[in-house]
Image (cartoon, rainbow, N blue to C red):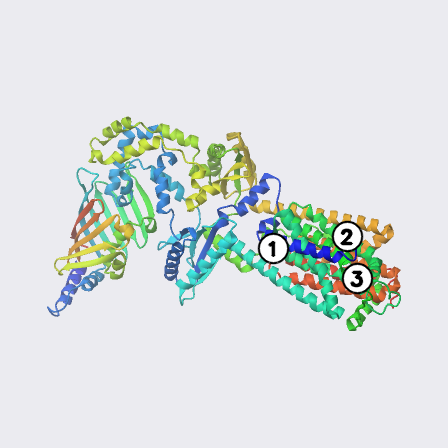
């Protein structure tokens, strides 16, 4: 075994590195860490939060100057951005673009709700023509004249009114969007790249900033950018920075500390081997299992450095002088002596993380797989590779300096605090029990790793644009787009009745923008045949000073409309403007089903929900109806998230205890060991809560790790109680292990991602308390040399 | 009466100093700027390719400095268009005798802005606004001048080819709007006493 262990490990290392280099790529999509859920309501909620078109819409604001100057800057900026080619549309003041008007105009006979047979009788045509004549005479005529020859009955104006009737949003002044008090000029941009191409979005954002700098010149105007792409880019930047910075920070701190602790460069190099293999194994395992590795997994994994270094430290600690009782033995024998404890410690940490691998969150499962693979590899490396690389009779000379003396004094004194520690733990448990509901985070936004500046800008711009993502929705879910559009149409009378009663202020139903194909065909059938229309038109023109040939385009258009293909949601897929965006927001496909979403405004009370559902179900029973209220349901999703977190923690803790009992083969000893990390966990939660930190799933994961590591400390303190002769070797290794873990995880506190700072905070606090409780309650530790 | 005389007097005063003084756009606009309000009766003919005979309108046009222009149409339909600053109000007589009011935003109707600006800015003596919307060419003299306004914006040019104003002193006598596609409207104005 001795001989071929190094070659085997070298081979594994080469294979692993090759695999990582060639096959594994890193992702930064935060969706992997968002709550997922089974039921339709939660999936719809998530779709609202991350919907396709919303994922590409950038909100831009310019402030800090006079309105006139802001308008000029806005126009210049828009011109540059349009020329850049990176944006599907740049809307800084159009209601509908010329292109969109053209599309609506061409489909006006299908879209206009006024198209009925009665509209095209000779009498009705005559009335329409007389009205047009009056309009021609009027000052408004210059506007309506352009459509007169093709659309004397005014269908286009009917359609345009429905499409342009917006509730809230920016006002137009001087041709440019402004917010309500004219302090900020606004612009809406659609990034041309698809929703999750974050690098392309980053390029688009850079384009906006560069264009603004070029246009702004000397003035004091400021640029604000909001919208989903801004979040994604900020998150990606943050995660990338973290991965690089934290890995470097942790590595440097670790190496420096190891040099101080071991005073031997060879020992330091040896110590880093289990760590290196651990990280490699972790990345490979995640790559094999998931196809790609999330940036946060790597950042988190780099802090497992602190854990993976424990094993070689314990091993090497045994090789220090003076230990006359142990001298003369081979490294293997030293290792075998501590292997049972080391193995049990590794196993409990692995169990703690194994619970995560069963989570449905991709992100958490990745963390679990990474940790399990990493720790197993680190332990295996310590067990089989290190002894093979250490020469016989290798001994470290580590003088016990002031730090060791301080720790030794601490270990001697700690048992006196055994009772106060008990009181503290019990008080913490009681405090948690009393405030159980209040300690948890309620807000989903707390999980986003975007900087506070980005979040603030986004919030202000969303208010300006009245992009109301919080409003309640009435949803029809069915087999096809046609089915849900028909259901939406059938629900219109019920919705109108609610508005009349005052239960609603207004609503945006998709069927009003895009009627079902059935309705469109009905309108087509209402249009008269060409010959009939010509005859009626001739009759209507009698006595009116119109040129008889003037309306030939009208006749041709109606004839064409009779055989036109009805419009379907797929016609609005190009995402080239607000038209497409509004249709896509109203009718979309989700997981194989189709959904029609009606946005409700001014809902008077909760009873309205129930009343609406009853009415909608009665009107259109062939589809399923549900209501989603993003604010209310997000809170419910967070509660669900929290419950899963607690379940994971409980499973992990039970697994740890069982492993412990099996390993120590003594129930009393297992309990004695188990109780200190448990007390530490309770106290950590109480202290975080007191400090005002709202707990999330990621704090719970950190606490799971605390259980795993705390068991290690308690195990070693317990071992010291049984083998007093190991005090000189095991105790230094113990406090060094604690210190390295602390250094490793405190690096996370500087991360931008709430996911990582949560874990950093809970682990650093938790393991410190664990060390304290383990020292205070260690049995037989009074016999310190 | 007094105001109009003053305006005329001012114009004469400006012209009087010497025959060498140049009468130009600025002079004309300065003259208009001094006039704070004016009223004129109009008769308008609208020629359209869609119509066999031109439409005949009569009514009254009134201006109040700095930015209020009112067009009151008497025949063939009763209508009142009030343009005050950026806001537009259109009151139309209904068949049942009532009046329906529409509020329009100039931003929503990109063709209306230059049309209104052409007349209103001239009456206000606002050369800057005129220049912003049009390429301005002035011919003639104080007694008989012709102002040719060619729209700058390409989108506006696609609908309106030219606006021509004829006048004497500080009175506009004729407004002719030529549209792309051949339609045009000719409005003759007869100043009314205040």
Q: Is residue A424 above or below residue A564?
A: below
* Marks 2 and 1, how far apart at CA: 31 Å
Tags 2 and 3 on a common chain: yes
Left or right, B137 with reference to A241:
left
Please tell me which residue is depicted at 51% across the width and 51% down the height of the picture. Answer: A197
Q: Earlier in the sequence, mark 2 or mark 3?
A: 3
Residue neighbourhood size for the residue with mark 1, other residues' Cα within 10 Å, grouped as few (<14), some (14–19), many (≥20): few
Residue B6 placement (x, y as % from top left): 17, 62
User: Is residue A709 visible to us here?
Assistant: no
* Marks 1 and 3, how far apart at CA: 31 Å
Q: Secondary structure at mark 3?
A: helix
- Which residue is more in the foreground, A34 or A666? A666
Q: Is residue A621 above or below residue A2?
A: above
- The quadrant the N terminus of chain A occupies is bottom right
- The quadrant the C terminus of chain A occupies is bottom right
User: What chain is tagged by disc 3?
Assistant: A
- Which residue is more in the foreground, B64 or A120? A120
User: Is residue B6 visible to us here?
Assistant: yes
Q: Is residue A668 above or below residue A508?
A: below
According to the image, label 2 marks what residue?
A348
According to the image, label 3 marks what residue?
A315
User: What chain is tagged by disc 2?
Assistant: A
User: What chain is tagged by disc 1?
Assistant: A
Please identify the quarter of the rendering in which residue A300 is found.
Answer: bottom right
Residue neighbourhood size for the residue with mark 3, other residues' Cα within 10 Å, grouped as few (<14), some (14–19), many (≥20): many
According to the image, label 1 marks what residue?
A21
Q: Secondary structure at mark 2?
A: helix
Mark 1–mark 3 CB contact (< 8 Å): no
């Amino acid at each position: 075994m001795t001989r071929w262990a190094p070659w085997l490990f070298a081979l594994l290392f080469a294979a692993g590195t090759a695999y990582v280099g060639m096959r594994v790529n890193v992702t930064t999509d935060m969706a992997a860490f968002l709550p997922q859920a089974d039921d339709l309501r939660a999936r719809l909620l998530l779709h609202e939060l991350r919907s396709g078109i919303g994922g590409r819409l950038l909100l831009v604001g310019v402030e800090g100057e006079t309105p006139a100057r802001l308008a000029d800057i806005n126009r210049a900026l828009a011109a540059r951005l349009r020329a850049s080619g990176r944006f599907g549309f740049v809307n800084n003041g159009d209601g509908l673009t010329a292109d969109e008007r053209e599309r609506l105009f061409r489909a006006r006979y299908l879209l206009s709700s006024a198209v009925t047979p009665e509209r095209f009788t000779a009498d009705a045509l005559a009335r329409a023509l007389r009205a047009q004549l009056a309009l021609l005479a009027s000052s408004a005529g210059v506007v309506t004249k352009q459509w007169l020859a093709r659309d004397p009955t005014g269908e286009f104006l009917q359609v345009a009114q429905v499409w342009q009737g917006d509730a809230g949003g920016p006002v137009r002044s001087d041709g440019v969007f402004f917010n309500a008090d004219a302090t900020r000029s606004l612009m809406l941009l659609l990034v041309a790249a698809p929703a999750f191409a974050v690098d392309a979005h980053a390029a688009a954002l850079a384009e906006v900033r560069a264009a603004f700098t070029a246009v702004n010149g000397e003035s004091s105007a400021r640029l604000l950018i909001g919208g989903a792409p801004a979040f994604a880019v900020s998150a990606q930047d943050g995660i990338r920075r973290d991965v690089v910075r934290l890995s470097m920070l942790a590595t440097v701190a670790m190496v420096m500390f190891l040099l101080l602790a071991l005073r031997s460069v060879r020992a330091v190099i040896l110590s880093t081997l289990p760590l290196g293999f651990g990280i490699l194994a972790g990345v490979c395992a995640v790559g094999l299992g998931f196809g790609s590795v999330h940036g946060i997994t790597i950042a988190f994994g780099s802090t497992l450095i602190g854990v993976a270094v424990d094993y070689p430290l314990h091993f090497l600690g045994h090789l220090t002088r003076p230990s006359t009782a142990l001298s003369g033995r081979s490294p293997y024998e030293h290792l075998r002596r501590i292997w049972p404890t080391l193995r049990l410690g590794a196993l409990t940490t692995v169990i703690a993380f194994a619970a995560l691998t069963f989570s449905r969150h991709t992100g958490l499962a990745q963390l679990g797989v990474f940790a399990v693979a990493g720790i197993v590899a680190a332990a295996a490396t310590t067990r089989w590779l290190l002894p093979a690389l250490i020469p016989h009779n290798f001994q470290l000379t580590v003088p016990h300096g002031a730090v060791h003396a301080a720790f030794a004094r601490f270990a001697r004194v700690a048992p006196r605090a055994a009772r106060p520690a008990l009181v503290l733990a019990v008080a913490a448990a009681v405090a948690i029990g009393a405030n159980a509901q209040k300690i948890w985070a309620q807000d989903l936004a707390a999980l986003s790793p975007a900087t506070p500046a980005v979040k603030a800008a986004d919030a202000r711009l969303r208010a300006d644009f009245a992009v109301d993502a919080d409003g309640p929705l009435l949803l029809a879910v069915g087999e096809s787009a046609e089915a849900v559009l028909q259901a939406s149409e059938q629900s219109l009378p019920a919705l109108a009745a609610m508005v009349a009663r005052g239960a609603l202020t207004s609503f945006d139903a998709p069927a009003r923008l895009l009627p079902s194909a059935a309705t469109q065909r009905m309108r087509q059938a209402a249009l008269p045949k060409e010959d009939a229309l010509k005859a009626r038109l001739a009759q209507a023109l009698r006595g009116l000073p119109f040129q008889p040939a003037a309306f030939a385009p009208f006749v041709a258009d109606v004839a064409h409309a009779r055989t036109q293909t009805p419009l379907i949601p797929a016609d609005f897929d190009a995402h080239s403007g607000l038209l497409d965006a509004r249709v896509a927001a109203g009718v979309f496909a989700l997981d194989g089903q189709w959904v029609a979403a009606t946005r409700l405004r001014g809902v008077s009370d909760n009873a309205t929900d129930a009343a609406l559902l009853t009415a909608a179900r009665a009107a259109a029973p062939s589809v399923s109806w549900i209501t989603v209220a993003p604010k209310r349901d997000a809170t419910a999703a967070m509660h669900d998230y929290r419950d899963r977190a607690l379940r994971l923690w409980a499973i992990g803790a039970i697994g740890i205890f069982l492993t412990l009992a099996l390993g120590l083969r003594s129930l009393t000893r297992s309990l004695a060991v188990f109780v200190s990390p448990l007390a530490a966990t309770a106290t950590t939660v109480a202290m975080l809560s007191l400090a005002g930190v709202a707990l999330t799933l990621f704090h719970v994961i950190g606490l799971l790790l605390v259980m795993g590591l705390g068991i290690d400390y308690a195990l070693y303190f317990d071992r010291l109680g049984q083998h007093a002769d190991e005090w000189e070797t095991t105790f230094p290794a113990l406090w060094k292990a604690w210190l390295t873990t602390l250094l490793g995880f405190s690096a996370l506190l500087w991360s931008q991602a709430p996911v990582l700072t949560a874990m950093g905070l809970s682990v650093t606090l938790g393991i410190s308390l664990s060390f304290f409780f383990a020292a205070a309650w260690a049995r037989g530790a009074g016999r310190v040399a | 009466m007094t105001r109009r005389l003053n305006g005329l007097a001012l114009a004469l005063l400006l012209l009087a100093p010497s025959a060498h003084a140049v009468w130009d756009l600025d002079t004309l606009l300065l003259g208009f700027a001094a006039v704070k309000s004016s009223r004129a009766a109009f008769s308008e003919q609208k020629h359209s390719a869609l119509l066999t005979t031109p439409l005949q309108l009569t009514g009254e046009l009134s201006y109040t400095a700095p930015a209020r222009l009112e067009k009151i149409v008497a025949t063939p339909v009763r209508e009142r268009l009030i343009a005050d600053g950026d806001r537009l109000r259109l009151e139309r007589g209904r068949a049942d005798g009532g009046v329906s009011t529409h509020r329009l935003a100039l931003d929503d109707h990109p063709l209306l802005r230059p049309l209104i600006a052409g007349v209103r800015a001239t009456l206000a003596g606002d050369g800057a606004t005129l220049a912003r919307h049009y390429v301005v060419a002035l011919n003639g003299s104080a007694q008989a001048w012709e102002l040719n306004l060619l729209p700058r914006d390409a989108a506006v040019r696609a609908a309106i080819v030219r606006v021509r104003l004829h006048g004497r002193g500080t009175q506009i006598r004729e407004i002719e709007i030529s549209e792309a596609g051949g339609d045009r409207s000719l409005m003759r104005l007869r100043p009314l006493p205040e």
